[in-house]
Image (cartoon, helix red, strand yellow):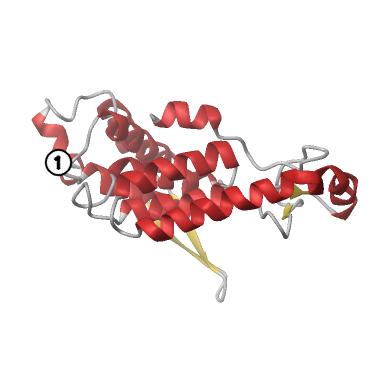
């Protein structure tokens, strides 16, 4: 599954009843039993409970537990299996947080792809870049995108999205706040020239254009 098709099926977290999305003022709470369905507050949870407890809750709980157990059984034996499972967890079950855990495990599993699954790196990076299922972390997203460009098994499905992701980050840069001192430091400088270069290279074929393999070093 390409990132484009994955994102088409990826639904943001919303309240099951009123469909309010998460924001700086609204923190959705998970059902304590199935840990999948989310609510904006107690009122909506109470409205939905009779319907939810009839069978949906237990079904979702079993599905989630199945994928957790499956990931534990696979461990570091097969990154491709973990990657495919993570896409299903995100799009079919709607549990972005669990999906990110599985993507990261796939990205760090050296079988069947030495160096980790590059597509899993891209998907995990996108979740961190946009805060889907995890706290937004642009620095971590940046690192994951960069890993793809230095990977020996790069290809069209992961090269283009990684370049575009790096382009987006360089358009804005990354500023980190030290909460203890209140000071700010630049992690990634805003660099529009580099952002444009990454966007241009996203359309290149890394398998035939020898110079793009070392894009990170060249810049």
* Residue 183 against residue 207 in the figure, above or below: below
Horizontally, residue 53 falls left or right of residue 9, namely: right
Q: How many marks?
A: 1
Image position, residue 179 (x, y; %): 57, 71
What residue is drawn where x is 64% and y is 52%? 61
Q: Which residue is mark 1?
A: 214
What residue is drawn where x is 71% and y is 58%? 33
* Residue 127 against residue 8 in the figure, above or below: below
Q: Quadrant of residue 27?
A: bottom right
The quadrant the N terminus occupies is top left
What residue is drawn where x is 66% and y is 43%? 13
> Badge 1 local density, few (<14 within 10 Å), some, or many (20+)?
few
* Residue 16 against residue 136 in the figure, above or below: above
Q: Quadrant of residue 208?
A: top left
Q: Depth check: give the residue in front, 86 or 28.
A: 86
Image position, residue 78 (x, y; %): 29, 51
Judged from the image, the secondary structure of the residue bearing numbered disc 1 is helix
């Amino acid at each position: 599954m390409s990132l484009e098709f994955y994102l088409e099926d990826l639904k943001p977290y919303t309240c099951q009843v009123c469909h309010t999305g998460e924001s700086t003022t609204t923190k959705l709470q998970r059902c304590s039993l199935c840990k999948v369905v989310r609510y904006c507050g107690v009122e909506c949870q109470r409205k939905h409970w009779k319907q939810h407890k009839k069978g949906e809750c237990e079904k979702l709980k079993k599905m989630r537990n199945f994928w957790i157990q499956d990931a534990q059984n696979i461990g570091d034996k097969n990154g491709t299996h973990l990657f495919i499972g993570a896409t299903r967890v995100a799009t079919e079950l709607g549990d972005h947080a669990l999906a990110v855990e599985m993507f990261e495990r796939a990205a760090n599993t050296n079988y069947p792809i030495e160096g980790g699954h590059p597509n899993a790196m891209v998907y995990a990076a996108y979740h961190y870049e946009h805060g889907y299922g995890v706290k937004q972390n642009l620095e971590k997203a940046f690192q994951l995108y960069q890993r793809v460009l230095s990977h020996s098994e790069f290809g069209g499905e992961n090269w283009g999205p990684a370049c575009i992701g790096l382009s987006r980050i360089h358009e804005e840069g990354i500023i980190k706040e030290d909460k203890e001192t209140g000071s700010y430091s630049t992690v990634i400088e805003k660099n529009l020239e580099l952002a444009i270069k990454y966007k241009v290279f996203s359309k290149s074929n890394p398998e035939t254009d020898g110079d793009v393999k070392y894009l990170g070093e060249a810049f």
